[in-house]
Every structure is written in structure tokens, then in C-alpha cells.
Amino acid sequence: MIAAKTILAKLSDKWMFLALAAAVYLSVLIFNAGLVDVAILRFAQLCIKIMPAFVLVFILMFVCNIFLDSPKIMRFLGKESGAKGWWLSIVAGVLSSGPIYMWYPMLADLKEKGMKDRFIAAFLYSRAVKIPLLPVMIYYFGLPFAVVINLCVIIFSPINGWLVEKITKSR
């Protein structure tokens, strides 16, 4: 009993989550093996679907590691970057495409090199502006609505970034 408590105390949250997920799968396997087969098949299909996006993100991370070193990132997206950091993160967020979770590894890498939380939040927030979908938005909601909603997203990106930085600094 003491050994089990010691092992549990040493496990990080990531390993605890993995152990919990494995326990759930094992219990489902015992009671409904067909469901586990379907889950594994769908997981494999999902991995095949997202593999091109993973490859793209890893290529972007590789290019970032070659061309962006810590001093450059600190100059453009660090504490003293000012307005150009806001504009760079907002424009990059608007121009970015694909699933948002594919950007997380690259943003984490940039954060390790000195990118501030405010710019990460502004990037993620400004991803709500979808340039390829603007014609559809204009068609369904009209030009004034599309302009106002997208301007609001762009204007509130720095406010969101500032709030995120204030909240994360308090931790």
C-alpha cells in the first residue's frame, strides 16, 4: 500500500492521464471488445488524416529553428517588441490556416525561445478571422456584419492578449 502511494506521488499529471486512459480502454475491452476495435480503427484513420498537417508543422518548426534564434524572437515577439509584435502576431493569426492544435507545438517552441504569452493569445484569438470563408460570411450575413465582426476580432486580439498575460502572470 505504501509503495503504491509512493509510485502515484512520483507520477506526473501526464502519466496519470495516460494510466487513466489505459484503464478505461482495458475496462471497455473487458466488457465490449468490439467498441475498442472501432475506437482503434478510428484513431488510426485520424492519425492518417492529420499526418500531412503534422509534417507541415514540423517543417515550419524546422525552418523556425534555422532562421529564428532567441534574440530575433525577443526582438519581434518578446517583452520589448511593442506594436510590431502585436501586428506580427495578429497578421500571422489571420493568415494561418488548418486545425488550431497543429499550431500548438510551434507556438510552444517559440514560447521557449522568448515569445510572450500576450502574442500567443493574440495569434490564437485572431485565427477566428478566416479569409477563405469571408465570401461565405458576406453572402449569409452581409458585408457590414462581416466587416464589423472581423474588425472586432482584430481589435480585441491585443486586449485578449493583455488579459491572458495578466492572468498567467498572477500564477
Image (cartoon, helix red, strand yellow):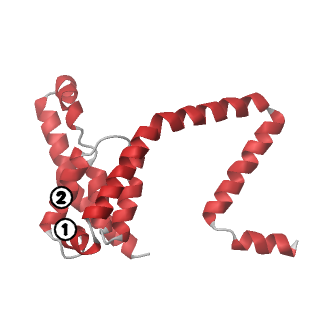
Residue 88 image label? 2
Query: Vertical placement of 49 versus 102: above or below?
Result: above
Numbered disc total:
2
Where residue 78 appears, as percent x and y from the top left, is 24, 72
Q: Could you tell me the amino acid type at mark 2? A: Leu
Where residue 82 appears, as percent x and y from the top left, is 15, 70
- What residue did someone put label 1 on? 76
Query: Vertical placement of 105 versus 28: above or below?
Result: below
Question: Could you tell me which secondary element the residue under label 1 belongs to?
Answer: helix
Of the numbered discs 2 and 1, the one sitting upstream in the chain is 1
Where residue 58 appears, as percent x and y from the top left, is 39, 51
Residue located at (75% from left, 49% from top)? 23
Residue located at (20% from left, 27% from top)? 141
- Whether label 2 touches label 1, CB < 8 Å: yes
Where residue 35 appears, as percent x and y from the top left, is 72, 30
**In the orientation shown, which residue stands out farthest toward the front?**
66
Which quarter of the rendering shows the C terminus? bottom left
Q: Quick check: 110 left or right of 76? A: right
Residue located at (59% from left, 36% from top)? 43
Q: Quick check: 126 left or right of 106? A: left
| Residue 112 vs residue 81, the one in the foreground | 112
Query: Vertical placement of 20 versus 144: above or below?
Result: below
Q: Residues within 10 Å of mark 1 (few under 14, many from 20)?
A: many
Residue 115 image label? none
Question: Could you tell me which secondary element the residue under label 2 belongs to?
Answer: helix
Report how far apart the C-alphas of labels 2 and 1 lie in the structure.
Answer: 8 Å
Q: Could you tell me the amino acid type at mark 1? A: Phe
